[in-house]
Amino acid sequence: EPEVTQTPSHQVTQMGQEVILRCVPISNHLYFYWYRQILGQKVEFLVSFYNNEISEKSEIFDDQFSVERPDGSNFTLKIRSTKLEDSAMYFCASSSTPDSIKNIQYFGAGTRLSVL
Amino acid sequence: AQTVTQSQPEMSVQEAETVTLSCTYDTSESDYYLFWYKQPPSRQMILVIRQEAYKQQNATENRFSVNFQKAAKSFSLKISDSQLGDAAMYFCAYRSPEYGNKLVFGAGTILRVKS
């Protein structure tokens, strides 16, 4: 069964460093998402992406964050200058269509980001 | 703003028994969708079941069923004949086309299955 793949599974970085989290969505999907889950808190929406542009973003997704689909398969989340509070599990998701009940978002296993 | 509340941080069930996980939500929208996702220890969230708000009939997927009470804004998940593989974190989630495609999640309920 097709899966959303995220790498790495765990990323450790120093505060102020840039990190790129990588995702390979399901191959025929066109809509991509990032969510994060700070330890002990709810899963929160960050951003959605379609047709090479951001379609929606939350207040969390500030100028320190960016997303890109650099080729036909990868979808990346970049954090320019990491802060301690960016430590979280980051989930990538993809769906084939945005509308109706058929928009099922399929999630990756997540990347745990630890900012020291 | 839409909110989703799961009031049970943790639940336990004996293998082969039935357990119900609670979820309530708050919205002013009439068109929306509700979901239950399962997150096993491997951390990949898997869709368990979904419900369209305009459908009165409760969704069922094998051993999983929901009790959707629209007026009460309640969406509980019933797991029948619980199995060891059902042990996981369960998230209730909401999505409304009026507010894009983002999922709004509850805090989750850890389900433990005892053999």
Image (spheres, helix red, strand yellow):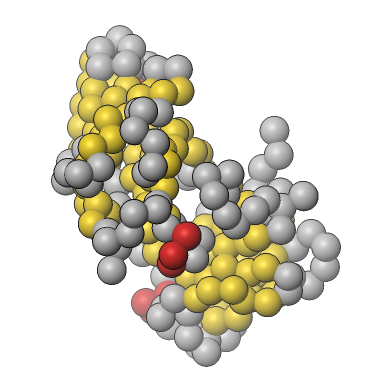
Percent x, y for residue B115?
29, 13
- Residue found at the far right of this picture: A72
* Numbered circles on residues, count: 0
Tell me the quadrant of the picture where the C terminus of chain A can be found.
bottom left
Percent x, y for residue B112?
28, 28
Q: Which residue is drawn at 27% across and 39% down?
A: B75
Residue A40 can be seen, yes or no: no
Percent x, y for residue A46?
48, 70
Q: Which residue is drawn at 62% across and 76% down?
A: A54
Occupied quadrant, residue B110: top left
Q: Residue at x 40, y 64 (%)?
A: A44
- Left or right for A61, reference A7: left
Nearer to me, A86 or A4:
A4
Please tell me whether residue A13 is drawn above or below residue A39 in the rendered image: below
- Left or right for B86, reference A80: left
Occupied quadrant, residue B34: top left
Residue B67 can be seen, yes or no: yes
Please tell me whether residue B14 is drawn above or below residue B26 in the rendered image: above
Percent x, y for residue A26?
71, 49
Please tell me whether residue B17 is drawn above or below residue A67 in the rendered image: above
Tell me the quadrant of the picture where the N terminus of chain A can be found.
top right
Q: Which residue is drawn at 20% across and 44% down?
A: B71
Nearer to me, A7 or B49:
B49
